[in-house]
Amino acid sequence: MIWLIAAALVLALVFGPSLWVRRVLARYSSPEDRYSATGAVLARHLLDKHELQHVEVEQTEAGDHYDPQTKVVRLSEHNFNRCSLTAITVAAHEVGHAVQDHTGYKPLRWRSHLVRFAQPIERLGAGVLMLAPLVGLVLRVPGAGLLMFLAGFLTLGTSTLVHLVTLPTEFDASFGRALPMLDEEEVLIDGDRPHASKLLTAAALTYAAASLMSLLNIARWWAILRR
């Protein structure tokens, strides 16, 4: 019984934030015509307002994000083309990252450095992960299982660490940048501000929720190795 309760708590901690984020984003995605401007139009307006004409706004299938390398705000199809509360709020959040970049916000720079540092580590981990079974079969190395776990940790754990360490950057983009912009431009319909705040919290927690899912994969690796 204790193990069942512990497992339920772990699953709630891992899946809970992700499910909550998805629920909040989906809830305010309709009506699709609640506002007069699409997420893309609002993003362009806010960027121009902050003299960021050089920053482009593009549609993407890779999820909403700001790319500090190419100076592009990328929005998913729903948020790019639609006029829902979710669309304009997420657009403002991503513009918040562009403003951080423009003003030299140091945590965003640290995040960019961490991402560049994490990528080769993840590739190394993936490579070792593929070679570990071969090493174990051919050379009969006793530590092959441990090597596989370490490779999995490098592959999955590094991105988790990056996302969690840079979580304050996400909250600053939401509440230090996006919400003040929405207030200043008087974008929100009366009564929508509390819902926008909830959406901005969800936008800030998107990466953290994904990181918790990565932790579950690490736990799955550990369970396999202990068999």
Image (tube, rainbow, N blue to C red):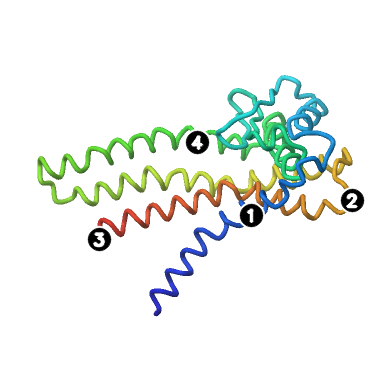
Q: Position of residue 118 (x, y in %)?
A: 44, 37
Q: Of discs 1 and 4, which sits in the foreground?
A: 1
Local SS, label 3 = helix
- What kind of residue is marked 4? Val
Q: Which mark is residue 226?
A: 3
Left or right: 138 with respect to 46? left
Q: Which residue is mark 1?
A: 23
Left or right: 81 with respect to 146? right
Q: Of discs 4 and 3, which sits in the foreground?
A: 3
- What kind of residue is marked 1? Arg
Question: Toward the viewer: 88 or 200?
Answer: 88
- What kind of residue is marked 2? Asp
Q: Position of residue 38 (x, y in %)?
A: 77, 34
Quarter of the figure that contains the C terminus:
bottom left
Which residue reaches farthest bottom?
1
Q: Of discs 1 and 2, which sits in the foreground?
A: 1
Q: Which mark is residue 115?
A: 4
- Residue shown at 49%/54% (left/top)? 212
Q: CA distance from mark 4 to mark 3?
A: 31 Å
- What kind of residue is marked 3? Arg
Q: Position of residue 176 (x, y in %)?
A: 75, 45
Question: Toward the viewer: 41 or 13?
Answer: 41
